[in-house]
Amino acid sequence: MRIETGLAGVAVRPWRVEDIPTLPGHADNRQIWANLRDAFPHPYRPEDAEAFVTRVLASDPVTNFAIEVDGEAVGGVGFTLGTDIERIGAEMGYWLAEPYWGRGIMGAVVRETVRWGVARFELARVFAVPFAENRGSARVLEKAGFQLEGVMRRSAIKDGRIVDQLLYAYLPEAGS
């Protein structure tokens, strides 16, 4: 599996064991951690990279992928598939190393990966819940065809603060 994004040198592909040594250098960033779930460690150490890639490689189906820029994994994108009555949907999450911010990479990655995920997993809905303060992530989702459904007030705690989250959804049949 390889998803081309339409940007030169940028693709989405499976994680590889060879990504482990460089992953901490891209992921060990407080600004990245501040906008993700607590399961994403900070500091991000070599043993965290090894545990993550090992877990992803053993998963079935594979739902977490590397964002590759010029041959190197510099971020991640993936789905948490719904279960039981919510099995028609998935939550999408993503991150990108800070030197690559502001280049349109994440918007292209999310747009193409959500299309791939909808087809691959037969999804009727994909959602994302960025922190309300993370305007960059909200713009990425909007550019990728997600629609804001609402604000989930005081719905999360991050770095000791209770924060709001935005609920964005991509509904393929609605043309989003």
Image (cartoon, helix red, strand yellow):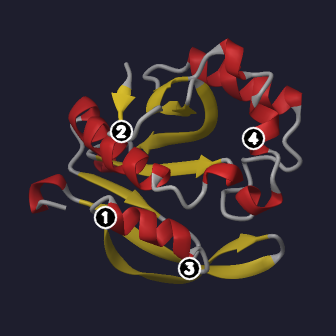
Give the crowd class for mark 4: few <14, some 14-19, many >=20 residues within 10 Å.
Answer: some
* Helix, strand or loop at mark 2: loop
**In terms of sequence position, does the residue under pointer 2 or pointer 4 come before the other?**
2
The quadrant in which the N terminus is found is: top left
Picture layout, residue 166 above or below residue 112 = below
Circles 2, 4 touching at the beta carbon (< 8 Å): no
Residue ID for mark 4: 26
Residue 97 placement (x, y as % from top left): 68, 47
**In terms of sequence position, does the residue under pointer 2 or pointer 3 come before the other?**
2
Which mark identifies residue 146? 1
**Mark 2 to mark 3 CA distance (whole Å):** 27 Å
Residue ID for mark 2: 5
User: As shown in the figure, which amino acid type bears the numbered disc 1?
Assistant: Phe
**Mark 1 to mark 3 CA distance (whole Å):** 15 Å
User: As shown in the figure, which amino acid type bears the numbered disc 4?
Assistant: His
* Helix, strand or loop at mark 3: loop
Residue ID for mark 3: 132
**Mark 3 to mark 4 CA distance (whole Å):** 24 Å
Quick one: 6 or 76, which is closer to the camera?
A: 6
Picture quadrant of residue 8:
top left
Residue 89 placement (x, y as % from top left): 31, 49
* Mark whose residue sits in front, 3 or 4: 4
**Mark 4 to mark 1 CA distance (whole Å):** 27 Å
Give the crowd class for mark 3: few <14, some 14-19, many >=20 residues within 10 Å.
Answer: some
Give the crowd class for mark 1: few <14, some 14-19, many >=20 residues within 10 Å.
Answer: many
**Mark 1 to mark 2 CA distance (whole Å):** 17 Å
**In terms of sequence position, does the residue under pointer 3 or pointer 4 come before the other?**
4
**In terms of sequence position, does the residue under pointer 1 or pointer 2 come before the other?**
2
The quadrant in which the C terminus is found is: bottom left
